[in-house]
Amino acid sequence: MSHNTFGHLFRFTTWGESHGPAIGCVVDGCPPGIKLSEADIQPFLDARRPGTSRFVTQRQEPDQIKILSGVFEGQTTGTPISLLIENKDQRSKDYSEIKERYRPGHADLTYDAKYGIRDYRGGGRSSARETANRVAAGAIARKILGADINIRGCVTQIGTHIVDGENWDWNEVPKNPFWCPDAKAAKDWETYLDSVRKDGNSIGAIVEVQAQGVPAGWGAPIYGKLDSDIASGLMSINAAKGAEIGSGFAAASYTGVENADEIRLGNDGQPQFLSNHSGGILGGISNGDTIVARMAIKPTSSILTAVRSITKSGDEIDVRTKGRHDPCVGIRAVPVAEAMLACVLADHKLRHRGQTGR
Amino acid sequence: MSHNTFGHLFRFTTWGESHGPAIGCVVDGCPPGIKLSEADIQPFLDARRPGTSRFVTQRQEPDQIKILSGVFEGQTTGTPISLLIENKDQRSKDYSEIKERYRPGHADLTYDAKYGIRDYRGGGRSSARETANRVAAGAIARKILGADINIRGCVTQIGTHIVDGENWDWNEVPKNPFWCPDAKAAKDWETYLDSVRKDGNSIGAIVEVQAQGVPAGWGAPIYGKLDSDIASGLMSINAAKGAEIGSGFAAASYTGVENADEIRLGNDGQPQFLSNHSGGILGGISNGDTIVARMAIKPTSSILTAVRSITKSGDEIDVRTKGRHDPCVGIRAVPVAEAMLACVLADHKLRHRGQTGR
Amino acid sequence: MSHNTFGHLFRFTTWGESHGPAIGCVVDGCPPGIKLSEADIQPFLDARRPGTSRFVTQRQEPDQIKILSGVFEGQTTGTPISLLIENKDQRSKDYSEIKERYRPGHADLTYDAKYGIRDYRGGGRSSARETANRVAAGAIARKILGADINIRGCVTQIGTHIVDGENWDWNEVPKNPFWCPDAKAAKDWETYLDSVRKDGNSIGAIVEVQAQGVPAGWGAPIYGKLDSDIASGLMSINAAKGAEIGSGFAAASYTGVENADEIRLGNDGQPQFLSNHSGGILGGISNGDTIVARMAIKPTSSILTAVRSITKSGDEIDVRTKGRHDPCVGIRAVPVAEAMLACVLADHKLRHRGQTGR
Amino acid sequence: MSHNTFGHLFRFTTWGESHGPAIGCVVDGCPPGIKLSEADIQPFLDARRPGTSRFVTQRQEPDQIKILSGVFEGQTTGTPISLLIENKDQRSKDYSEIKERYRPGHADLTYDAKYGIRDYRGGGRSSARETANRVAAGAIARKILGADINIRGCVTQIGTHIVDGENWDWNEVPKNPFWCPDAKAAKDWETYLDSVRKDGNSIGAIVEVQAQGVPAGWGAPIYGKLDSDIASGLMSINAAKGAEIGSGFAAASYTGVENADEIRLGNDGQPQFLSNHSGGILGGISNGDTIVARMAIKPTSSILTAVRSITKSGDEIDVRTKGRHDPCVGIRAVPVAEAMLACVLADHKLRHRGQTGR
């Protein structure tokens, strides 16, 4: 993928900075005749929205989506869908002092190195605010995929606090502010995150996303592999430091016998995998089993604790980042990761149909 | 990236199957005036070549590279460089019995699901043999990057046997058949891999690649991030199940304080990072520190031990894969991962220069 | 180029329909540090604007450009520049009766055939209104190219009324409502176009664009040729039916001796071409001479005279298109053609710099 | 399109120089399950082959195509198809004296300006020899399009000698060495071209290509328009200086009434166009009528008559180009233009199917 565009047949291009008048996204290549209104997109944005609990940033943004083109009389026309979200709660003065400062872990230094100029207000283009666009694009991608494909995500780890697979219940996810599928872990996280926040610190996390119902055959060798595109999509999310499919890094410890997903014939006459170490992808192509991907999110770089750094002009300083920051950005990354998975799959659905006619 | 092409300005397209007459690669967008001959490429192919120790496949392939275009009087002309490697040791009969069988962990089932037809000889297009092309393209990418950028890789883990950071010595890497930077671990791996092989089993691994000397400023927000493209490149390698940058998945367990790469001013007047959790990339753009990436490689799916599967026509069978397979494909993946890192960096060097003129 | 995106390194994506709330454009890959404000773009839009004389459509659109992102403190940041123009004078009722009608020469029938749905209001996505976006993108492209490159255009033919090369004077172009470089021809055209308009008819035209000051070396073999990209850009303009470079179709009648652009050494030590049949491009690469391209624009399809057609449901009808249409769309196509030439050149400037470092 | 790759879903990448060991092409994105062998491709190459009459270059090249990948047991597998043609009759010594010379009309000067180096033997990469690759790719494209779509081409003009529409008979095309549809004109051209050749001169031409049977609905707004992609494809052919669709440049002289393709309902219940000024494309999308495109080919730049030029080092010289050159390159461009049209259509067939499922 190049620059600010993601996807090949179903593709979107995002624009906008944290503290500009608005952010937005142009979705191109959407099939025609799909029912679409703002109401199909808004719930996903609401799920990603800041200010919903004390565990996420307190910035207040309604994140009201507007469709400016590509939909006519309630249906997509096949032409570009322009989506726009106004920025409402920018508070630029909060950020004025970082103008000259390179906050460790942020893109301040690298944007300056690359461009020689940066919009320093709230991270500018590198702000996680950009991800609202993907969530909107992802809502459209879900419409393309249809009701038979179920995409969902959760947080499986915060710091060293890991969900217990025995307790895994997807129904728990919306019941706590952490997208946690383990009710017991959620309780524990609440206490833990409060302590992290009070310490002026932050913490990393692991996010898992799944897609059920993807038919076998989507994907493409060799550089358009489904796993390659999913990894690319997840790694493009702010603060992501790793992406894996199926067993992922754990596969390094497995033997071939342990890792083999044995196959029997299901009652429906379709191949049935007795395990899913592959995460639903073999040779870059979906095998019909649930697609499972995970990403590692680093701890929020904006912390109240002082860390050593330098200024643009080379002075050595201590940086203490005040402001309305998520103690664990992994939490709000869940709907973003879901959206990226949806977009990759929608693109590959169209690409597969294009090449094979199926 | 789409289909069989990788890269945006510096890009390559590969073709060929394991048991066809040849495999090859077209490298497009290479700058003109770079000294290049087969001798610049061959050593990297020799390093990836099968049959060099008892720990890798015994297939005998000279992997002799031929340059068919794009080089004139010893220099690149800026036009496409066509590279070709003949297949010599195909032994198609070894594979005849897998025609109808879906080997667990292989792309047999998924290629059939996608295309309705597959070249079953030696894995066809999904064979790791394709990776020789990338190694060749990577050798050209290194020439573009120049001598100041040093790209190297190693195996850091085989099964649960992990190198000891205290023993890490890059000079050890070429001295053992495992690309292992820890002489003591290499001894241990020798014993361990012999046992794995004798058991008719295989084992996973983790490969690490580094690039030293990359200037700050390469990369691009948001979907052309350096880490996104590196992850995409690594995940496109056969058997890769995960990719990470810097601290990667370990970052999930870190606090913001632990994970902060503090900055001081170096003696050269350049920013100096006191740690490298970021893996040399911030906001998708290189920060001047060493770029560090890792990938997880699953155990070889071709094992002598019987595993349950089905045939194309739906019969339930046991599959025992004979043949000349790597007990640990992670080993030969090292030069491939180096090559993909080199290609991503060469592409971004040109893209950065294109946009900014620097 | 694909879908609604044009360009490779410098690229833009447009969206919007004639009668939606707005149209817009995302410009990606712009170099950082370029001074840019709405005032740099607006004059070009004003030149394309409808309602400026009786020879163009009377739709009243202020075409006020807004920059929503990518510019900070008066300079481009290297991130996507989002441009937006509100639609003000839509008068949707004017178009209600064409809902079921296929107007000959329009995209009504083909959009229905492709998508099964179309926004019939004012031509929807196929309206020439989309070209305002390109003019805006072109204004940014001019900034990238710098003051040494001079891009300008004119109308050389309306119907069979052709400008006289002897009278050619670029200074005349802004003095008449036709972008005509021949004051005498402009007079003639005024009379002629009045008669065309009164007849409820319309007329075709030829537009010429030139770029002076382009250095030798821009372009790329074989499918990224400068002439190939210019032709693609011009042919993407509404109503364009042909594109040519230099002598163009006239070259078919020339002998090799006549067509040879002989070369001598200029006083500046640079090659000097004694003629410019090539239009400044050889082998897809600029040769340092003025780039000259032309496009043929068909007569406006919306005419008051009745023409035979059918409805969506297959009824045979007569179509008489009322509304506020340009009698000769070629006139307002001039700034659009200039813009497309500017965009192609800006893209190739960056691509050339990326590959060669020059 | 970028660099040396053409197409979006069905795409090909070519490589090779006139006097290297071989030229070739990688065709990516071809649907699986299509019957394909060398015998499907060879006839189209034979039609383009040099040395077949005294009106084309006397270079003797068998142009024997080899398929190196992507076909298994007689069918395409959906993976890249690598095609290779060996260069047999290079005679490099013929070209040694042009090493320092800039032949007017050739890419010698521009390749040097761009790359600082060029393979001067026979034009290197800029040689029309590259077009053999497109003809091969076009043969595969025809297979994708199927038997219901008929693509054919001819020469309609050589110099000022134009075919008479009254005499047009497609059956005449293969009966003369000029691809001329008018038997009488072909006689005339024979005499005329003999005189051109004897004068040490050359002459331009116009080539027309048509595609019958293309269903309504292929193409894409705005920058992926069918006409935009056809123009881009035709203009990428060596010596092409113009491309037009339907009435093309003649449309500039037409009124809206004259140019309107009126529509009635055909006996098959489908729209029937009473004329075809549009060339089968409206708004960038096929309308179901025959697609008609034309390109202008300049006279061969290599002529025996002396023309003034300079050398690489700036000396003023006279250039007289000996060798085995086509007196009218337009003749051999016919199968190349057919191929490019076929490739554009195959790509758009897949793209249309991908987006709409039809």
Image (cartoon, coloured by chain):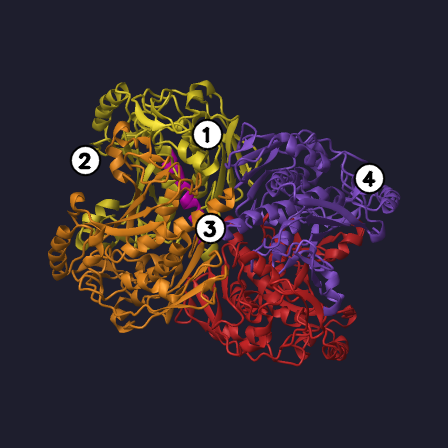
Chain colours: A yellow, B orange, C purple, D red
Residue D202 in picture, x, y percent from top left = 71, 72
Whether residue A93 is in magenta: the answer is no
Q: Residue C176 carries which label?
A: 4
Whether residue A346 is in magenta: the answer is yes
Going 39% across and 71% down the picture, which residue do you hit?
A: D73
As shown in the figure, which amino acid type bears the numbered disc 4?
Asn
Give the structural element (helix, strand or loop) at label 2.
Answer: helix
Disc 4 crowd rating (10 Å Cα; few below 14, some 14-19, many 20+) is some
The verdict on a common chain for dots 1 and 4 is no
Q: Is residue D134 left or right of residue A164?
A: right
Q: In the rendered view, tell whether residue D28 sits above or below residue A40.
A: below
Q: Do the residues bearing badges 4 and 2 touch, measured as CB atoms within 8 Å?
A: no
Give the structural element (helix, strand or loop) at label 1.
Answer: helix
Of badges 1 and 2, nearer the viewer stands 1
Locate the C terminus of chain A and report the quarter of the image it occupies: bottom left
Q: What stretch is highlighted in magenta?
A: A336-352
As shown in the figure, which amino acid type bears the numbered disc 2?
Glu
